[in-house]
Image: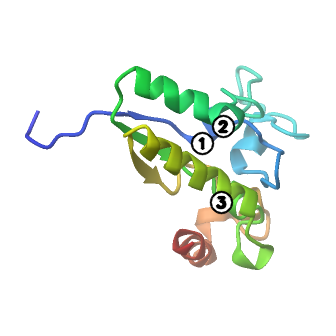
């Protein structure tokens, strides 16, 4: 591998966080597709698994980071759940401070353990409020301005 190549691990918010309906997080398109919360899973789901609890990283974050340190990890790529920060997908819908604080705590905890964070702002978990019959998600250019608002936080 070339000099400067960075080895690390990566996760996606929906796959590990859990806490799907806690502390103000809004539903994402993955919640709807997988049958999380109160929705029925998509008919194409072969298993009826969802991210309501997942690995429960939302509650076990500090323990998880300690495990990363114990494994000798130095770099960690994670994604931020847009719907945990902006439950309705837009600034007009309000900022979820508990969601913001979770990611601040995660980044600070990673730094305390000498692990460099790499942040992915979008890992295919669009807030459900931005994908409806009237606003079809990324098929409507209006979503771009909402992403810009979210990314600017």
Q: Are marks 2 and 1 in contact (CB under 8 Å)?
A: yes
> The residue tagged with tag 2: helix, strand or loop?
loop
Residue at numbered disc 2: 17
Q: Is residue 151 left or right of residue 136?
A: left
Q: Residue at x 64, y 40 (%)?
A: 14
Q: In the rendered view, would you say 98 is above or below 36?
A: below
Q: CA distance from mark 2 to mark 1?
A: 5 Å
Residue at 78% across / 34% down in the picture?
52
Q: Horizontally, is 53 left or right of 103 in the view?
A: right
Q: Which mark is residue 13?
A: 1
Front one among 56 and 49: 56
Crowd band around label 3 with a 10 angstrom C-alpha radius: few (<14), some (14–19), many (20+): some
Q: Label 3: state its secondary structure.
A: helix
Residue 94, x across and y down, in percent: 77, 73
User: Which of the pair 112/140 is nearer the observer?
Assistant: 112
Residue beneath disc 3:
100
Mark in the foreground, 3 or 1: 3
Displayed quadrant of residue 135: bottom right
- Measuring from the top left, give residue 21's x and y in whole percent: 83, 45
Question: Which image quarter holds the C terminus?
Answer: bottom right
* Coloring scheme used: rainbow
Numbered disc 1: secondary structure: helix
Q: Earlier in the sequence, mark 3 or mark 1?
A: 1
């Amino acid at each position: 591998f070339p000099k400067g190549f960075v080895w690390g691990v990566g996760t996606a918010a929906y796959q590990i966080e859990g806490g799907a309906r806690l502390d103000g997080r809004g539903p994402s398109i993955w919640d709807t597709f997988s049958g999380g919360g109160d929705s029925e899973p998509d008919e194409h789901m072969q298993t009826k698994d969802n991210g309501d609890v997942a690995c429960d990283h939302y509650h076990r974050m500090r323990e998880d980071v300690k495990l990363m340190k114990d494994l000798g990890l130095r770099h960690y790529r994670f994604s931020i759940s847009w719907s945990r920060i902006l439950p309705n997908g837009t600034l007009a819908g309000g900022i979820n401070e508990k969601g913001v604080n979770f990611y601040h705590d995660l980044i600070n905890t990673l730094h305390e353990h000498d692990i460099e964070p790499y942040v992915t702002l979008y890992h295919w978990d669009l807030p459900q409020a931005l994908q409806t019959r009237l606003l079809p998600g990324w098929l409507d250019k209006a979503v771009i301005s909402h992403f810009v608002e979210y990314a600017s936080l």
